[in-house]
Amino acid sequence: MAIQWRPELNALTNPPSYRARVIPKDSFGYKRLAERIVQKNPVCSVEQAEAVLRLRDEEIKEILLEGSQVSLENSFTYHLSITGRMDAPDDPLPPDSTVNVQVYAVRPYVETMRPVVKLERLPPEQKVPFIAGAEDTVLDLKDVLNPAGALRLTGTDMLFDPKTGSGECVIEGTRAGRAVQSRFAMISNSMMLVVPEIPIQPDHWNNEYRVSVSTRYTAHGTLRTGAYQRLLRTPLAVNLIAGSGILSGAETSPLVGVTGGQFKGAATSARVRIQAALNAQDGKLRLSLLDMSEGGAAGDGVQVTENGVYTLLGYADSALASLEVMVENYTALINKVRDEYTSRMVDILDVSSGT
């Protein structure tokens, strides 16, 4: 039988993420567990099996209170732990210290289960439109809002009829602008293809957007809205002479600006991506140039430690030899990458020489 699970919002992360929550089909107590044991091993009565189970747990409690732990071979380990903070090794335990019982399955026990587990995904508990992914179908890149492409949304319970007004799809700028979408190639419960109408925001570096779907599941039902939890970004036109803001959002001043660069040979334009990636282990932020395919060629990463000018080298076969950028607000940039983009923010740049 399959183990059922459903996606559940993890409110502790920013931006919000989802975790897989296992949904138990049933709950077994002492008696029902004893009945299962006797059914498979009819060597005693159900009452005797239940009594042994209860005695087992009482005996484990006594062993823990004696200061020992219980390690059942290839099964479970029981031990005590203490919750409490001390500022020095000779400090007494604080008054709010508590003793806890820890129970966990040992590795061999878990490893025997994993190969045979079958999983079944359940829909979200409350029926609302759920957008699981967004991808531009022309560039084949996730979380890209391409004015020259088509946005593919995947998820569940997204169906509506724009002609009857039973729902809507909205693209909204994080600083300003809201556009109800009207051009669809298809709409179904699990997929939607939108030819995007993108609202204009005040400054060119405001290229950050949210997308949501609203629908009614009955003729007179409540309008229910589901928003995509990740932010979408549009390509940016970058002029090497005039300069351009990049890697920003709703800010009134860009966090990063392009201040110069060099093309290879006779090239005067190039389309590349720039990535700001935060390493979760060492906390270091690095900028690098990428090609237009996920997992493709990349230039060397440059570590960013403060405001200032940094030179990024192009990758192999790129028409762009280098790009010079000015980090205007290092603190805001690193916070944005970590908190709003789960440690990786990418912009598409259409770079021109400006001549």
Image (cartoon, helix red, strand yellow):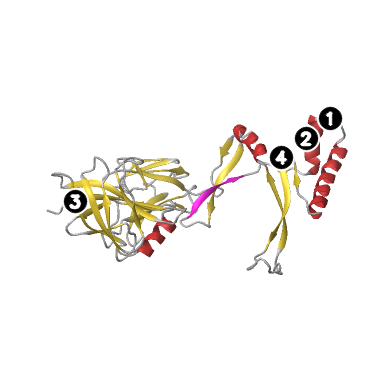
Which of the two discs, 1 and 4, sits closer to the camera? 4
Q: Does the magenta stretch include residue 80?
A: no
Q: Count residues near mark 1 (Cα–Cα under 10 Å), then give few for <14, some for 14-19, many for 20+.
A: few
**Bounds of the magenta segment:** 16-22
Query: Circle 3 is placed at which residue position?
Result: 262
Query: Circle 4 is placed at which residue position?
Result: 75
Residue 280 % position (x, y): 46, 53
Residue at position x 86%, y 42% from top? 51
Which quadrant of the rendered structure holds the N terminus?
top right
Residue at position x 32%, y 57% from top? 247
* Labels 1 and 4: the sequence-earlier one: 1
* Labels 4 and 2: the sequence-earlier one: 2
Q: Which residue lies furthest to the left in this view?
A: 355
* Labels 2 and 1: the sequence-earlier one: 2
Q: Residue 173's quadrant in the figure?
A: bottom left
In the foreground, 248 or 145: 248
**In the image, is residue 254 above or below residue 151?**
below
State the separation of the CA atoms marked 4 and 3: 63 Å
Query: Can you see residue 34?
Result: yes
- For badge 1, the amino acid type reads Pro
In the foreground, 234 or 279: 279
State the separation of the CA atoms marked 1 and 4: 22 Å
Query: Circle 1 is placed at which residue position?
Result: 42
Which structural element holds mark 4? Answer: loop
- For badge 4, the amino acid type reads Ser
Residue 354 % position (x, y): 15, 54
